[in-house]
Amino acid sequence: MKKSVVLLMTFVLALTLAACGKNNDGGNAGASPSASPSGSSDAGASVSGSFIASGSTALQPLVQQVSEKYMAANDQVSIQVQGGGSGAGLSQVAEGTVQIGNSDVFAEEKLKDADADKAKSLVDHQVAVVAMAAVTNKDVGVDNLTKDQLVSIFTGKVTNWKDVGGKDEKIVLVNRPASSGTRATFEKYALGTKSQDLPGAIQEDASGTVRKLVSETPGAIGYLALSYLNDSVKAVQYEGVEANADNVASGKYPVWAYEHMYTKGEPEGAVKAFLEYMLSDEVQNGDVTDLGYIAINKMQVTRDVEGKVSNK
Amino acid sequence: MNLPETRPSADPATPRNAPATAGAPAPKPAGKAAKHRLEEWRGQAFVYLCVLLLVVIIFSIVVFIASRGLTPFVSQGVSVKEMLFGLEWAPEADHPMFGALPFLFGSFSTSLLAAIIAAPLGICAALFMTEMMPKLGKTILQPAIELLAGIPSVVYGFVGLSVIVPFLRHTFPGQGVGIMAGAIVLSVMILPTITTIATDALRSLPAGLKEGSYALGATRWQTIARIILPTTLPALLTGVVLGIARAFGEALAVQMVIGNAPHIPHSLFESATTLTSIITLSMGNTTTGSLHNNALWSLALILLLMTFLFVFIVRMLERRSKHA
């Protein structure tokens, strides 16, 4: 008797596991969005529903922290925050497998050519600004780099720090992979051109790893979001302008990008309420600033998809 | 169920307790038989179902990867020749290029180098555990080596980045990252595979073979070198090939220490990359269906085909060892 019970339980377990496996498979292929927002916006102040936000790992800590606070205040809402990268987030939200796609870049920059229609169906919610600074190992002896100098360094025309006013030391590039949103921002606004994957250059995607490598490798240069800066690396000025929140907000320091949360069509119910909370002063002046992002309401300039900057 | 060792006699012809319960001896054994048949059937159905599920899962994985991975060749204008022999990988450039040879080179060189480091270590550890000090080996060395298999790869990667990369940077010219750093990390990771398979092979060796050698006056070293190692060679090689396969597929730990420049390096201490590390680095940042994304699936397909090749080699080695 006992044996058959055990057998039965194993059977059930196997079936459950099998079902899980199949679900994942279907999720990848873009099938049934089982967790669609069931929020009823007409229910007055209280919202309910569950949804998933996935994508950019640069934005993930902020969304994670804010979602936990939001769920604590609204126990009818359940939010799942996942990483995966900006590209994955945009694909998934366009397919409808998740409700919010987090991205470091405009959807139009990722979803091009055949996918351009997908980008049109997405609605942009800019929730924060992230700025990047070029960082070097502490021993290179350079405080400021001009745009031309950075271009020469990242395209391999200059290979020694003495050519840009530093010590006689070989330059070691710590770049990001070609698909990275951080790299796209740095190339677009700091270099104005694409950098190259040079032989001998290091490529890492994770900011923590980039910082570790730059701080330990003599002659290394890389770039980091301001929230990752600390004493182990040296942030250099760009065209004589220091990378800090005030200079970004006033438009003096150009190397920054919006953090986007895309929805497919206009958001409703719980998703809408959450995005509104994200843009509230409480979050913008609290969590956003605490985590090293720049609050969207502090920005005195705006920028569009083409990179045109205008005063607010 | 409570009839010990007399199951055959439980059929109606010779019921042991028939005199006592003379009323109805027939239905009870019949019920038992039906129960056994049901048990048999349940077991069989369960096994068949599991196997069916397994086949479906494997088949769908292969079909999925192949359908994505073949798209760049079929409809997006990338040639197989460019993918396999091209030296330039620039997927986001204005004229995208998809030369994966640097990745193939990186994958093969790191995993072969890892096997060259790990094979002597693993096989010697197995010899020590089976031939020299079985007791110490079984109680201390074997659990210690098996523990290595349980450490998550991100931990290996982080240890590699914090210990091995700085060490190599200070000791050799270069940045520390590169094929050597990747191979060292991988060699520790595949040590349990090689050691476990070698130990099993050595343990299953017929005792008579060794005793015969000793009886002829051979020393322990002569026995190991001339009898034990040649006899178990195919099994030892199986372990090494499985180790290489594991190293070939490892992504995260290698990605953290190899540097990831998409070029064939000039030295073991220069930034290089592997098939797996370029996939983990770029997959999340690309959108489904884009050429870049599909090209990464093509790399995954190459990885899958390499795995098939490794399985094939292992099969061949096993057949050899049976004939020997």
Image (cartoon, grey):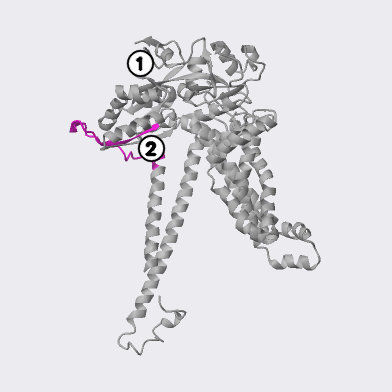
Q: Which label sits on residue A30?
A: 2
Q: Secondary structure beneath disc 1?
A: helix
* Residue A38 belongs to the span the image colors magenta: yes
Q: Position of residue B75 (x, y in %)?
A: 49, 32
Horizontal arrangement in the rendering, residue B155 relative to residue B204 (left or right): left
Q: Which label sits on residue B244?
A: none
> Residue at 43% across / 12% down in the picture?
A247
Q: Position of residue A140 (x, y in %)?
A: 61, 18
Which quarter of the image is occupied by the N terminus of chain A? bottom left
Q: Chain of mark 1?
A: A
Q: In the image, which residues are magenta?
A: A26-54
Q: Could you confirm whether marks 2 and 1 are on the same chain?
A: yes
Q: Residue furthest right?
A: B217
Type of amino acid at the residue the image marks with label 1: Lys
Q: Is residue B104 visible?
A: no
- Label 2 with label 1: CB-CB less than 8 Å: no
Foreground: B170 or B126?
B170
Q: Chain of mark 2?
A: A
Which quarter of the image is occupied by the C terminus of chain A? top left
Crowding at dot 1, Cα within 10 Å, few <14 / some 14-19 / many 20+, comes out as: some
Q: Secondary structure beneath disc 2?
A: loop
Q: Which label sits on residue A298?
A: 1
Which is in the foreground here, disc 2 or disc 1? 1
Q: Position of residue A42 (x, y in %)?
A: 18, 31
